[in-house]
């Protein structure tokens, strides 16, 4: 496969040029105008940040992208799917409130927010995974499936399971419905924390497979009957139902790549990533630790594998921030140096498997040319 082009610019600007304008110029140089946007519904897939987290992308960057898409004739909307875990984004009502509190609305971004998998995370489409080895089909948010064009706008940061979160995680994991996330994480088996269960029986009423009983006075999920739809997680108002997260990290990485391939298959897709506020953990946390690396720049490409590889390479070449989780680890006496910022920040993570598997199934190539502008 030929080298993919990844376009890069740092955050330096002239006095009369905003970073939003610079981001638009980057997208134009990367060829976004090659896509036929005229009259098309354009899903800008992004992460709105958990309540209490301040490292997510500012709405200003979103507006720059949305305005450019509208200038090219498209109809953009912001979207993400509900979360699998308890928190402020596990149903559309809370998710929309979360987005609003964190600054994402039609005024600040120039377009509306649509939660891709609906009110309870059940509005999904089952689509084939091209060349899938771990997943033959993917369960994805209906709005992503219905969109004519996908534009990924991702915040590049560390992650406690996948090493980092970039374009592939933004689309693959973020685009999965609740059931799709369960398939990726742990083959789709939720569990109950009895200490949090109030015996309201709402989860049993929502269960589509008659898998929940209350013989002990607390909810119990029969793992043999459970189909892994995740309805019970969305139904519980007390965060008593979650997941065991028992899939090996390597397999999780591969499944994310396969879900990304399914979502962008036979559909125009463009990918943008900003390496800034590189927190050690995901924006799904209700907090964020200090950045482990300095702000590096903005990147864009038609190839999500090449884009993630380029972002990883730029991060690995950067000087760690001393007063950070990564800096603390490297300063520890006797610390086993991995010579890998993602591993040294979060030991035992896996990230190369995502890119290797993405390349293997034809999602993209790790062989890229970095075009600096």
Image (cartoon, grey):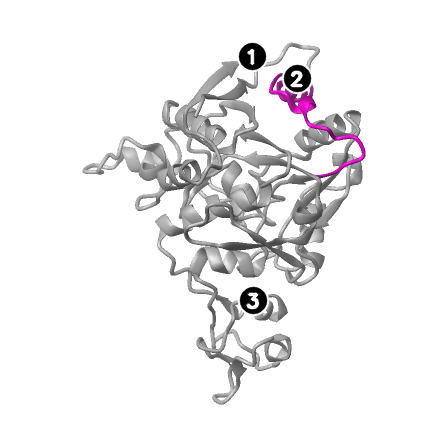
Q: Are marks 2 and 1 in contact (CB under 8 Å)?
A: yes
Q: Please state if 201 lies on the left or on the right of 4 as rendered.
A: right
> Where is mark 3, residue-wise?
229
Q: Please state if 120 lies on the left or on the right of 161 as rendered.
A: right
Based on the picture, tell me whether residue 27 belongs to the magenta stretch: yes
Please tell me in which quadrant of the rendered image residue 321 appears: top left
Crowdedness near tag 2: few (<14), some (14–19) or many (≥20) residues, C-alpha within 10 Å: some
Q: Are marks 2 and 3 in contact (CB under 8 Å)?
A: no
Q: Nearer the viewer, mark 2 or mark 3?
A: 3
Residue farthest to the bottom?
215
Dividing the image into 4 quarters, which one contains the N terminus?
A: top left
Crowdedness near tag 1: few (<14), some (14–19) or many (≥20) residues, C-alpha within 10 Å: few
Q: Which mark is residue 25?
A: 2
Which sits earlier in the primary sequence, circle 2 or circle 1?
Answer: 2
> Where is mark 1, residue-wise?
373
Q: Which residues are magenta?
A: 18-42
The x, y position of residue 257, in whole percent, is: 47, 43
Kindly state the secondary structure of the residue where label 1 is placed. loop
Q: Residue at x 56, y 67 (%)?
A: 229
Q: Residue at x 43, y 61 (%)?
A: 186
The x, y position of residue 137, in whole percent, is: 53, 55
């Amino acid at each position: 496969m030929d080298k993919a082009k990844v376009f890069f610019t740092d955050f330096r600007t002239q006095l009369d040029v905003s970073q939003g304008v610079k981001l638009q110029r980057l997208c134009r140089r990367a060829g976004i105008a090659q896509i036929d946007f005229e009259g098309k519904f354009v899903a800008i897939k992004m992460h709105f940040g958990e309540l209490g987290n301040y490292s997510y992308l500012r709405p200003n960057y979103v507006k720059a992208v949305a305005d450019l898409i509208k200038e090219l004739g498209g109809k953009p909307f912001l979207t993400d799917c509900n979360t699998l875990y308890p928190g402020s984004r596990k149903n559309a009502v809370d998710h929309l409130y979360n987005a609003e509190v964190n600054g994402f609305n039609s005024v600040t971004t120039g377009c509306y927010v649509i939660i891709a998998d609906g009110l309870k995370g059940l509005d999904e489409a089952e689509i084939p995974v091209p060349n899938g080895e771990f997943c033959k089909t993917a369960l994805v948010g209906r709005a992503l499936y219905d969109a004519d064009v996908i534009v990924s706008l991702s915040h590049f940061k560390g992650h406690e399971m996948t090493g980092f979160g970039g374009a592939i995680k933004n689309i693959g994991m973020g685009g999965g419905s609740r059931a799709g996330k369960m398939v990726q994480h742990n083959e789709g088996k939720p569990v109950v924390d009895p200490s949090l269960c109030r015996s309201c029986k709402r989860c049993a009423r929502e269960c589509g497979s008659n898998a929940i009983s209350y013989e002990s006075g607390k909810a119990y999920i029969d793992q043999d009957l459970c189909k892994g739809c995740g309805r019970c997680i969305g139904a519980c108002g007390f965060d008593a139902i979650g997941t065991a997260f028992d899939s090996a990290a390597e397999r999780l990485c591969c499944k994310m790549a396969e879900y990304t391939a399914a979502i962008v298959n036979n559909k125009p897709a463009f990918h943008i990533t900003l390496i800034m506020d590189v927190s050690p953990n995901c924006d799904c946390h209700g907090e964020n630790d200090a950045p482990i690396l300095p702000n590096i720049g903005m990147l864009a490409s038609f190839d999500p594998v090449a884009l993630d590889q380029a972002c990883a390479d730029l991060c690995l070449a950067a000087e760690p921030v001393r007063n950070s989780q990564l800096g603390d680890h490297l300063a520890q006496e006797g610390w086993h140096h991995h010579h890998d910022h993602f591993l040294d920040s979060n030991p035992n993570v896996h990230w190369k498997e995502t890119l290797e598997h993405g390349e293997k199934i034809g999602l993209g190539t790790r062989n890229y040319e970095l075009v600096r502008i």
